[in-house]
Amino acid sequence: MSDDPGGPIAPGGDRLLEVLRALEARFRQNAVGLPQREAISEGWAGVLFRIGDCSVLAPLQEVGEVLEVPRDVTPVPATKAWVFGIANNRGTLLPIFDLRAFLFGIATRRSARNRILVVRREEFPVGLLVSDVTGIRHLDARSQRAQVLEPPTGLKPFVVGGFELRGDSCPVLSLSRLTLDTKFNLAAA
């Protein structure tokens, strides 16, 4: 075996070490530098939706899926006005609750934009009827505020912070806290 400068390289010889040093120097000279380290901000992801005219965020990990309102929803007699009904969601019974009616006492106005947020609970999933789902928002977790500028009264017990979106304060609603609420679990009239 020989290298470019000429002469054989003996295994374990000094010439081998010289060639390796020359290669290392050439590689270092032609090496492309690593990109500058940038501080990576911790991300936060949430689902942006509306309850009536109120825009709200919910942590993405609390929303199992977003569904269109099923065509066949069976009303449940002798329950609170905010119990929307029960539907079959791929073979699983899904109780659906009108979130606006629960929080503010006003039924959600029906439209093609209505959606169901499915919240996974230990025992069974729960569907929450909302006015509209805008989509997923990825935000810088460092910009989350502990307090929100006066969220609507019905939301207050379930608000866990907020973000500023398009110049407006948007509360973060804990859906898991909401579905564990005593009032929420007493759906019988």
Image (cartoon, rainbow, N blue to C red):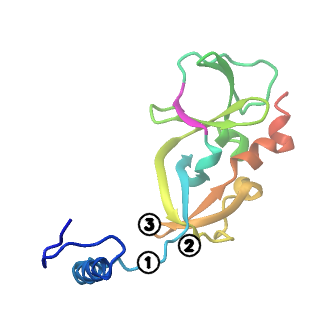
Mark 2, residue position: 143
Mark 1, residue position: 38
User: For the residues marked 2 and 1, what is the alpha-carbon distance in whole angstroms?
Assistant: 18 Å
Q: Secondary structure at mark 1?
A: loop
- Residue 159 image point, x, y percent: 70, 59
- Answer whether labels 3 and 2 touch (C-beta < 8 Å): no
Q: Earlier in the sequence, mark 1 or mark 3?
A: 1
Q: Earlier in the sequence, mark 3 or mark 2?
A: 2
- Residue 185 image point, x, y percent: 83, 36
Above or below: residue 158 compared with residue 102: below
Q: Nearer the viewer, residue 54 or 177?
A: 177
Count of numbered labels shown in the rendering: 3
What is the crowding at mark 2: few (fewer than 14 residues within 10 Å), some, or many (at least 20)?
A: few
Q: Which residues are magenta?
A: 64-69
Q: Residue at x 48, y 77 (%)?
A: 39
What is the crowding at mark 1: few (fewer than 14 residues within 10 Å), some, or many (at least 20)?
A: few
Q: Is residue 40 left or right of residue 102?
A: left
Q: Residue at x 16, y 76 (%)?
A: 7
- Quadrant where the N terminus sits is bottom left
**Front: mark 3 or 2:** 2
On residue 166, the disc is 3
Q: Is residue 176 left or right of residue 27?
A: right
Residue kind at label 2, given as amino acid type: Ser
What is the crowding at mark 3: few (fewer than 14 residues within 10 Å), some, or many (at least 20)?
A: few
Residue kind at label 1, given as amino acid type: Glu
Above or below: residue 90 compared with residue 139: above
On residue 17, the disc is none
- Quadrant where the C terminus sits is top right
User: For the residues marked 1 and 3, what is the alpha-carbon distance in whole angstroms?
Assistant: 26 Å
Q: Secondary structure at mark 2?
A: helix
Quadrant position of residue 81: top right
